[in-house]
Amino acid sequence: MHLINKKWFFDTLYNRFLVYPILNFGYIVSFKILDRGFIELAGPFGLSKLALNWSFLTFAIQTGQITHYIFYIVGGICFLFFGILVNDLFLKDNFHLIVFYFSLIFFI
């Protein structure tokens, strides 16, 4: 009768050696590393850091010389026509993208 009457603490051993380590691992890996680490760096903090770096880059590029600005404009137009060429070679049925590229010329 003594065998059935008392608690044997299997649930305590099960919780201590199996459940709590799995919960702790899940908390550390999924919450602290992935959610608060990687996802925040790739998401809001990473995008704000990227925008800050791009703003410093564009500030360093702007020299005020007209020849530099002409070089950037011509380079942008060449990049635009290269995109049209790649689009024409690999994606034959996208005429609306070509019209979109040519309409962007007026906004440059």
Image (cartoon, helix red, strand yellow):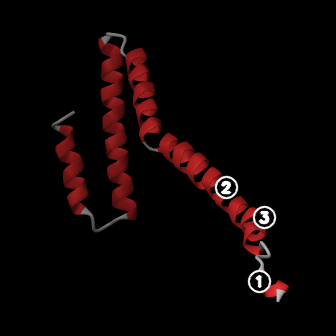
Q: Label 1 crowding class (10 Å Cα cut-off): few <14, some 14-19, many 20+?
A: few
- In depth, the one of 21 and 80 nearer the eye is 21
Task: State yes or no: discs 2 and 3 in contact (Cβ < 8 Å).
Answer: no
How far from the left and from the top, in percent, is residue 75? 36, 32
* Depicted 32 relative to depicted 74: above or below: below
Instruction: Place residue 97 in its image quadrant.
Output: bottom left
**Lower position in the chain sequence, tag 2 or tag 1:** 1
Query: Disc 1 residue type?
Result: Asn
Query: Disc 2 residue type?
Result: Asn
Q: Secondary structure at mark 2?
A: helix
Which is in the foreground here, disc 1 or disc 3?
1
- Which quarter of the figure is the N terminus placed in? bottom right
Q: Secondary structure at mark 3?
A: helix
Circle on res. 62:
none
How far from the left and from the top, in percent, is residue 54? 42, 27
Which is in the foreground here, disc 2 or disc 3?
3
**Lower position in the chain sequence, tag 2 or tag 3:** 3
Query: What is the residue that sits farthest to the top in this orientation?
Result: 64
* Residue located at (42% from left, 15% from top): 60
* Residue located at (33% from left, 34% from top): 76
* Residue located at (38% from left, 23% from top): 55
- Which quarter of the figure is the C terminus placed in? top left
How far from the left and from the top, in percent, is residue 104? 20, 42
Q: Name the residue beneath numbered marker 2.
A: 24
Q: Label 2 crowding class (10 Å Cα cut-off): few <14, some 14-19, many 20+?
A: few
Q: Name the residue beneath numbered marker 1.
A: 5
